[in-house]
Amino acid sequence: MLLSVGILTVLIPRRVGHLVDQLVQGQLDQSVILQELGILLLMGIVIYFLRVGWRMQLFVASYQLGVHLRTELYKRLCLQGPDFFQQQRTGDLMALGTNDADAIELAAGEAMLAGFDGTMTLLMVLGMMLLGVDWRLTLIALLPFPFMAIAFKKITQEVHDASHQALTCFSQLNDQVQESIAGVRTVRALGLEARNATHFAALAEQAADASLRAQRWEAAYEPAVGLALTSAGFLTLSLGGYLVWHAQMSIGSLTSFTMYLGQLIWPMFAAGWVLSIIERGRAAWKRLGPILSLPLTIEDKGTITAAPQGRVEFDGVHFAYSEQAKAALQGVSLSLQQGQTVGLVGPTGAGKSTLIRLLLRQYTAAQGSIRWGQHQLDKYKLDNLRGHISWVAQEPFLFSASVSANIALGKPDATQADIEQAAQLASVHEDILRFPQGYDTPVGERGVTLSGGQRQRVAIARALLTNSPLLLLDDALSAVDTGTQTSILQHLRGARVGRSVLIVSHRLSAVADADHIVVLRDGKIIEQGSHAELVEQNGWYASQWRYQQLEESLDEL
Ligand SMILES: Nc1ncnc2c1ncn2[C@@H]1O[C@H](COP(=O)(O)OP(=O)(O)OP(=O)(O)O)[C@@H](O)[C@H]1O
């Protein structure tokens, strides 16, 4: 289609030139003129339809590219581990999927379209001018264009830099909005609205300045093209007039030539526009490309798809979050027999959550091994491993859906009876029945309409519903009162058939009934044994136990 458009476009001036020459020589009668005009009109109509058809094809492809890029980015983000998200900002990642992907899509659609069209027209028109009309006139007419090319080079570089800056500023703006909205309660509580608004205004100003700078440079394309074309027109008419005057060229040829020069207007203007869109696209790709090719923080090289079962064993595990950071775990060895409940306690920052993160393979231990049954953790396929662990985080995340949907997240085919049974085990059933729409009540974004304790219990119900062989509770009962905690733990004991449970808790009463208790401090195990043994040892556990018992009895007064 592109080729046909190009050929038809350059044929028109040539036909018109012949027509003019025959007219000047008085060789045409009215019927031939009408026939020629009909042919020209037909050529124009064919060009129109070919252009439309070609546009449609290219736009479909560019939209497909946009979908592909967004999907790839989304998939990549889903596979990356916490390390990745610690280094990236949410607003920035969101901007990549919206603004940057749009810029690339535009470069692949509009810019490709106009770029191919313009280049093809330019080459064909130049070929016709050189070979079909007059090479001397062509060379003279082309004299201003090298200057235009030099101007284009400078403008293009500036547009690229300004576009990159504009995209980065937009990302920062996005990030500020995202963070302010997520933390709106804190912002309000601390009376930071005015300060945040000023900061936002400054960022918005910066983004506008960068966009404006890109626009200003883009605007410079037009005068450069205009100047080159006007100069070319002046040179053509001067030399062409001279040649016609000296009978070295026909009026028809000069007419064709000036029509060809007119046909250069579109490719020249398109060049400026295309270059600016391509530079925006390139700047966006420079930001998005590296994120798509960044290696996954956790490689999924495991092949075992059979359900993991048996004892979970940590052996001499060392781990630090970074080379500079102090080790969060130092030579930790512990084992969790199948069906056993192990309590993990210790002061804040001792490494309890880190141990759970290693078990979930969010991070990999630097030294030592972690096995589940016969195999090291990394031998299991990642989704198989995680699919067999139920984890309730310190701060559970609820999605903006109904209570039912949140509980059934890990088991979408669960029946209402299953959901309610899990909610009863998590001691949240009664609370849910009091909600305006019961189990169908929407919980709001991140579960904002629920209390901290209700959120935790919904998350526990979600974990219990999947019936995984390993349950990890990472301080998951911290926001419920001691009475509710006791009843949840009792339900857990009743419902536990062959399921291993690891309970991390600051409240020692949550682990007092565990089969084994491990005390971590500064990444090392300092005490372990049953509750009675630890109380007997009179170490950290015993003193904490006495302190918490005293606190509870004071609370009851
Ligand atoms: N993502 C992280 N990046 C860097 N350091 C971290 C990260 N998460 C935790 N740490 C550090 O690792 C150490 C152990 O943290 P961890 O969260 O495992 O402690 P914890 O025993 O679970 O504490 P808490 O009882 O307060 O939840 C701490 O010194 C903490 O500052």
Image (spheres, rainbow, N blue to C red):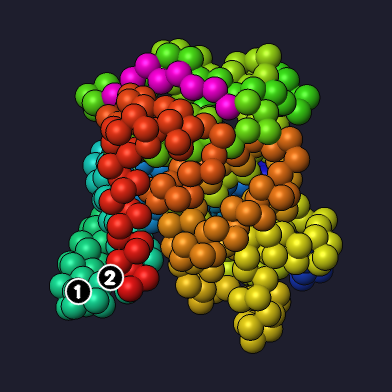
- The spot of residue 358 in percent (x, y) is 48, 29
Q: Is residue 405 left or right of residue 117?
A: right
The tag on residue 186 is: 2
Within-10-Å neighbours for mark 2: few <14, some 14–19, many 20+: few
- The spot of residue 258 in percent (x, y) is 47, 54
Q: Report the quarter where the C terminus lies.
A: bottom left
Q: Is residue 231 left or right of residue 82?
A: left
Q: Which amino acid type corresponds to the residue marked 2 in the rendered image?
A: Thr
* Segment colored magenta: 327-336
The image shows a total of numbered marks equal to 2
**Residue 99 seen in render:** no
Q: Which image quarter: residue 543?
A: top left
Circles 1, 2 touching at the beta carbon (< 8 Å): yes
The residue under the point 62% across, 82% down is 435
- The kind of secondary structure the magenta stretch mainly shows is strand
The residue under the point 54% across, 64% down is 484
Q: Which amino acid type corresponds to the residue marked 1 in the rendered image?
A: Leu
Q: Look at mark 1 in the image and give the residue it sits on.
A: 190
Q: Nearer the viewer, residue 170 or 136?
A: 170
Q: Is mark 1 within 8 Å of ligand 1?
A: no
